[in-house]
Image: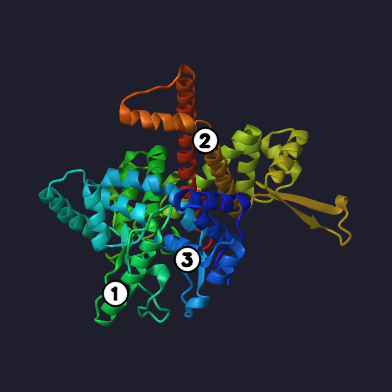
Amino acid sequence: MSHQRIHDQYEISLACGIVTESFGKDPGKICRAMLYHGSRTLRETVQETGLSPSRSQRALLILAQHNVVLVIPESRDEDECQYYTKLGVILERLRYPQYLLFAQEHYRGSHNLLIECLLENGRLDEHQLMAGIASKTESDRIGLKRAIVSSSRQALAQLAEDQLIISVPLFIESNGTSRSNFVTRGQTSVSQNSVPSQTVKKIDDAGRKTEDDIKEGKQNNLWLINCDEFTFRLRRDACAAVFREKVGEPARHLLLEEVEFNNEAFLLSNKIDTPRKSVHGSSFRDYSGLVQTLPNLKYSTCQSCINNNEAHFHNIKLKHVMSLVRSKEIEAVVRERFGGPACRIFRLLLMKRNLEQKQIAEMAMIPVKDTRELLYKLLKAKYVQIQEVARTSDHAPSRTFYLWRVDLPYVEEQVGREIHHATFNVRARLMFEMSREQETLLLLGKAQHTNDFPLTMKQRDSLIRMKTVAARLECSMMRLNELGLFFNTRADE
């Protein structure tokens, strides 16, 4: 039973690279097997990866701790328990720096420590979370640490209320009752690179203690980062920035307030068009004052849905804003790759749908020969499609219409794959540049402890070059992640 669609080779390679870099080679092998073949049992994982059962169990434990591997609820026999992973869940780890920046922008102090601790360690209960925050505190004063832990409990409640973190039960049975399952124990903070056998034994012991607590009615939930909520808020802010650029600052406030009023800040299946029901019982609000300052709002491309009864009641459709951003970004890609005339053809086909080559040449004011070349370049890149409409059963070319069109959802998916491909290439280049100067970086790390920098002039020049290249590549990664917010949703939901 497979839980995901067939993914592109570069998407799988990117996901496996992220897992290997974060958790080690063994978890990377297991994720590769699951992404290629779907859900796997422990026995199948051992056969396909060549790892021993104990190493496979430890790798699965690490991945489950960080919510990368999940258990199929119907699996009851522990020997035949099936595990699976999702590409979107792994690729969300690329946005972790954006999550931290968002938290630093909107919260302070203990909130940031909580989010950082959960991003580093995965699922944690409240006791482990407080212990992790205390360990991050540099001060040795016991009173100060207690004050930080106390404020962290208040921050934990606020983050849970804002749904940036969610509480998950220790063990889940398919019928909704609790049960023991080693993949979801996660009682001890697990190292990202390796799990010693002593740690696994402690986790098993913690699991047995939890079973006793469950019998007594005591069950502490685990806390987990709500990536859907973070992603939605990042998208909301990006859409608000588009409103500010297209219409003005009041429109940005209008969108942010409208989303807050509609209570859309939690999405099912990570889809923008599935808002949670408003607690106010209505999705409309009086914005007459703002509409007076935005007379062009309902005539702009960033328009809202206006109630027919009263014009000053309106509700912003975030999915329309995202669709607009995707269309503009695709046009920018076409213009960059194929030139202005090709972008004109692409935009024309978006508006007019099915057109013949001669019609395209006339409307776009491009010579027929150039139009033909541009159309076939776009067709090769899968940005346009061609459809044959035969007037006779023999499909003779002279009696057949050849209509060109743009299948926008398909093009958006194609651009999403290209973003993953570009991200894979940028990460590979960055790792290559870092490996070239690995010895110099080791020397620099040792020198920082001794306050002595025994680097030659050539090594210093190489280090400066590497830092410059790395900064540019990281900027490219950030830009690709921003585009991924609009193009890449969880395809395997």
Q: Amino acid at mark 3?
A: Gln
**The N terminus appears in which quarter of the rendering?**
bottom right
State whether residue 4 is above or below residue 231.
below
Q: Position of residue 272 (x, y in %)?
A: 43, 58
User: What secondary structure is marked by label 3?
Assistant: helix
State whether residue 145 is above or below residue 368.
below
Q: Residue furthest left?
A: 143
Residue closer to the observer: 75 or 423: 75
Q: In the rendered view, does 113 fall on the left or right side of 493? A: left
Q: How many marks?
A: 3
Residue closer to the observer: 295 or 189: 189
| Residue plotted at (38% across, 45% down) | 98
Q: Position of residue 4 (x, y in %)?
A: 56, 64
The answer to whether the residue labelled 2 contacts the one labelled 1, judged by CB atoms less than 8 Å apart, is: no
Q: In the rendered view, does 181 fall on the left or right side of 326? A: left
| Residue plotted at (56% across, 69% down) | 40
N-term mark: 2 or 1? 1
Using the numbered discs, state the Cα–Cα distance from disc 1 to disc 3 in whole angstroms.
20 Å
The answer to whether the residue labelled 1 contacts the one labelled 3, judged by CB atoms less than 8 Å apart, is: no
**Mark 3 sits on what residue?**
57
**Mark 2 sits on what residue?**
435
Q: In the rendered view, does 252 fall on the left or right side of 159? A: right
Q: Which mark is residue 209?
A: 1
Q: How is the model colour-coded?
A: rainbow
Using the numbered discs, state the Cα–Cα distance from disc 2 to disc 3 in whole angstroms.
31 Å
Q: Residue furthest top?
A: 457
Q: Which mark is residue 367?
A: none
State whether residue 423 is above or below residue 36.
above
User: What secondary structure is marked by label 2?
Assistant: helix
Q: Amino acid at mark 2?
A: Ser
